[in-house]
Amino acid sequence: METKRDFLKKLGLLTVGGVVAGSVNPLQAAVSNAKAGGKSIGLQLYSLGRELSADVPAGLKKVAEIGYKTAELAGYGGGKFYGSEVADFKKIAADAGLKITGSHVNPPVRKYTAENKAEVAEFWKKAVDDHAKLGVITLVQPGMPTIDSHEDAAIVCEVFNKAGEIAKAAGIKWGYHNHSGEFKRVVKPEDKEKATNPWSQAGDIVYDLLLNGTDPKLVFFEMDVYWTVMGQQDPLDYFDKYAGRFPVLHIKDRSVLGQSGMMNFENIFNRAYKNGLDEFYVEIEGIKTGMTQFEGVKQCFDYLNKASFVK
Ligand code: MG
């Protein structure tokens, strides 16, 4: 009869000294992590793509087993969360041992106008109601509305403030998440001759117009640090200039965190904590061939979990 020892040997898990370090059951690892307190590292679930949608309950369990404590959703639509009614989804998350603290939601219109701003507000009322039942702390718009002028930016700020007001009434913080497009400039008609292209120094950076045009009591900014760098800006400058506006971050790199060499996460965390960082979510895209999304998500967790600059 095959002994347990033979079986482990076959798997390559047994050395002369016993079980190889690192071959610990992931669930045990998660439990010991939780027992030890551990760091509160969050995951934007968009990172998992179809590997999550294939089996949401099992996927959320895996996320918790890796060691993530919180998650930000990217699966709200038609009043449901990843296809489940709110009560069912709440149970799925609770069973997985994952705290759902945030959610990304885009309104159905891209270009805001005086005519459709009431419709957008109605959308947020419903989204806020559904998310209040789920019990999230933050609700975030991840997609950029059309902004080609100062007038566009002004109406976007008005719509954002209104969304923030609706969310605040339900005890939820409302925020905006950027990509790189927010770092283009818009130019007033009288300054047009100074602008040779959208990246010229003439005009105003859209992101600054949004920061300056929204009420800090109603709208926060979930900066995606990778997209800010891709927009040719330094996240640290923004943390200093707009202290307190970035309580939540997306920690992202070109692929696995810390591998591209283009992101100085130590400086980012140090400066962000100094200026009011409460929470952050890992996000990963651009996974290399031969690696699953879950493997990429685990490597990102390990990087931050080991990093002395992450509290
Ligand atoms: Mg992001």
Image (cartoon, helix red, strand yellow):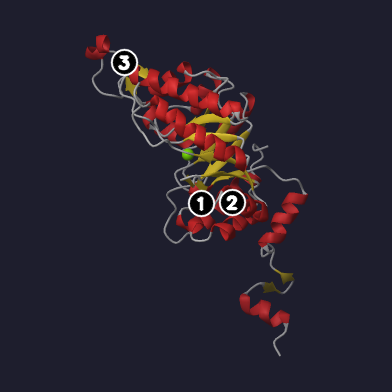
Q: Earlier in the sequence, mark 3 or mark 1?
A: 1
Gap in Å between the C-alphas at discs 3 and 1?
Answer: 43 Å
Three-letter code for the amino acid on which mark 1 is drawn: Tyr
Q: Earlier in the sequence, mark 2 or mark 1?
A: 1
Decide which of 207, 1 is in the foreground and name it: 207
Three-letter code for the amino acid on which mark 3 is drawn: Ala
Q: Nearer the viewer, mark 2 or mark 3?
A: 2
Q: Position of residue 170 (x, y in %)?
A: 60, 30
Q: Provide the secondary structure element on which disc 1 rests.
A: loop
In which quadrant of the rendered image does the N terminus lie?
bottom right
Residue 116 quadrant: top left
Q: Which mark is residue 82?
A: 1
Q: Which mark is residue 89?
A: 2
Decide which of 205, 106 is in the foreground and name it: 106
Q: Count the labels in the image.
A: 3
Question: With 80 as the anchor, is 97 left or right in this view?
Answer: right
Residue 7 quadrant: bottom right
Q: Provide the secondary structure element on which disc 3 rests.
A: loop
Residue 264 at least partly seen: no
Three-letter code for the amino acid on which mark 2 is drawn: Phe
Residue topped by disc 3 = 202
Q: Position of residue 207 (x, y in %)?
A: 42, 24
Please tell me whether residue 218 is drawn above or below residue 127 in the rendered image. Answer: above
Q: Earlier in the sequence, mark 2 or mark 3?
A: 2
